[in-house]
Amino acid sequence: MTTPAAVRLVPCPTCGTPSAFAPSNRWRPFCSERCRSVDLGAWASERFRVPADAPPDSPSDAGSDAGTPPELPPRH
């Protein structure tokens, strides 16, 4: 007879309730579908953001044609 492995509990990222981090919890690491939906909604409404470095502001970039396609040579 084998004993089942201990289920690892982690705090739900939304509400902090202990949540089973196991295949039996279909919403892991969240405790419920509601908490998972709340988290998804926060990302969708941009309340959560991944930090990024701002692009450099330099005078040489102001007149750059980096966003325009190159000109094609004239056709004969």
Image (cartoon, rainbow, N blue to C red):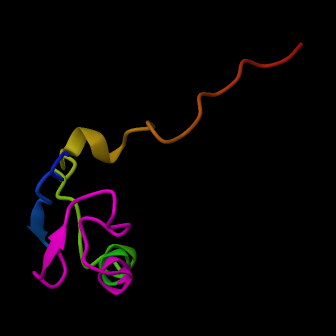
Q: Residue at x 19, y 67 (%)?
A: 20
Asked whether, in this view, residue 11 is left or right of residue 67, the answer is left
Q: Magenta span has 25?
A: yes
Looking at this view, is 62 or 25 the one in front? 25
Q: Residue at x 15, y 85 (%)?
A: 15
Q: Residue at x 28, y 65 (%)?
A: 28
Looking at this view, is 30 or 75 the one in front? 30
Q: Residue at x 72, y 18 (%)?
A: 73
Query: Residue 16 appears at what percent x and percent y?
Result: 10, 81
Query: Residue 23 appears at what percent x and percent y?
Result: 33, 57
Query: Residue 60 appears at what percent x and percent y?
Result: 25, 38
User: In the rendered image of this protein, does residue 43 appear above or below residue 7?
Assistant: below
User: In the rendered image of this protein, does residue 18 appear above or below residue 75?
Assistant: below
Query: How many marks on residues?
Result: 0
Residue at the far top in the pictured view = 76
**Highlighted range, magenta:** 12-37
Quarter-wise, where is residue 33 in the image? bottom left
Quadrant where the C terminus sits is: top right
Asked whether, in this view, residue 33 is left or right of residue 72, the answer is left
Query: Residue 72 appears at what percent x and percent y?
Result: 70, 23
Looking at this view, is 66 or 7 the one in front? 7
Q: Magenta span has 10?
A: no
State whether the magenta stretch is mostly helix, strand or loop.
loop
Looking at this view, is 32 or 24 the one in front? 24
